[in-house]
Image (cartoon, helix red, strand yellow):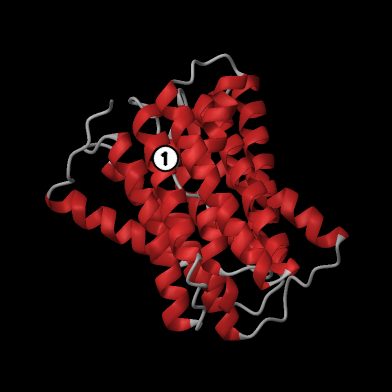
Amino acid sequence: MPAVGRPQGSDAVLLTVALVAVSTSGPLIVATAVPALAIAFWRNAMAVGVLLPTALLTCRDELRALSRRELRLTAVAGLMLALHFATWVPSLSYTSVASATALVATQPVWAALLSGRRGVPVGRAVWIGIGVAMSGALLLTGVDLQVSGRALFGDVLALVGGAFAAAYMVAGSEVRRSVSTTTYTTLCYSATAVMLLVVCVVGQQSLSGYDTDDWLKLAALTVGAQLLGHSLFNVVLRNVTPTVVSLSLLIEIPGAALIAAVFLGQTPPLMAVPAAALLVAGLGLVIRAGSRGTTPSIPVE
């Protein structure tokens, strides 16, 4: 069982800031009066606008030396990330922030299942955690079904988004073995932005003409969840075990629900609380039993 200890000093502060940053993702998306797929495109395109100059200045040699395999895997990761955003972001238009955030957080479950498909042994404790987590997910979707069929559709989109996020992490972990974070994220976000741009153009999604307030929310979404959260989690990983970081990410579920309740007036049904708690408990078991020194599932919401 991986050791779990409390982050100390500055690491605890950075981890807290990162958790707050990623917890704002769902509420900001709901509060932004921009088409869902356009939100997904702009947050990636804006992130590339920040990362690309840094990559060109500091990682030029590495960019030139990338192998075809690394480029191919990065493109696959970019496709999986695009599919993640294309399912999870729209899910917030159908179901609550609390449900969508909880269900997309099933990423570690999908990652464990993908590992099993690739021949990596999956221990008994992981299977128990998967069972508990999926029981919580089923209970949560059952609660939302009582609300409306629309909410259930949003739950399904969020679950699928979690599966695509796991596939993104699996493909990306292979690239990250030999490629720096700056180079990888720049290329991956670029590929994701291009793919989402094509989808937006084909689907005739409006990509401009937004209010200033909406542009500011898009910028806050990019700086917060897309850049600040991801970057700080990687900084903390220098001193804190991946297991601790992965477990701390589960705080995003109640964090996003609290922000949505305060600022959006989204109060989840009473029965959704034990369902989400069961899901979180199962995810905690999966992470503790299966993360053994591996790279944690950095949030992509």
Q: Residue at x 45, y 69 (%)?
A: 257
Q: Of 176 and 287, which appears nearest the observer?
A: 287
On the rendered image, what quadrant is the N terminus found in? top left
Where's residue 123, x and y in %? 44, 20
Location of residue 65 by image quarter: top right
Left or right: 201, with 83 as reference point: right
Total tally of numbered discs in the picture: 1
Element type at mark 1: helix
**Residue 110 locus on image (x, y percent):** 57, 36
Relative to residue 126, is residue 114 drawn left or right?
right
Q: In front here: 28 or 161? A: 161
- Residue drawn where x is 58% and y is 40% of the image: 187
Q: Amino acid at mark 1?
A: Thr
Query: Which of 255/276 is in front?
Result: 276
For image coordinates 69% across by 54% down, the residue present is 156
Is residue 106 visible in this depiction of the protein? no
Q: Residue furthest left?
A: 9
The percent coordinates of residue 227 (x first, y second) are 44, 55
Residue 273 visible in the picture: yes
Where residue 206 sits in the image (x, y, percent)?
78, 72
User: Is residue 184 or residue 237 the one in the foreground?
Assistant: 237
279 relative position to 116: left or right = left
- Residue 94 placement: quadrant: bottom right
Q: Residue at x 18, y 46 (%)?
A: 7
Q: Is residue 31 above or below residue 50?
A: below
Disc 1: CA contacts within 10 A as few (<14), some (14-19) or many (>=20):
few
Classify 242 as above or below 67: below
* Residue hosting label 1: 58
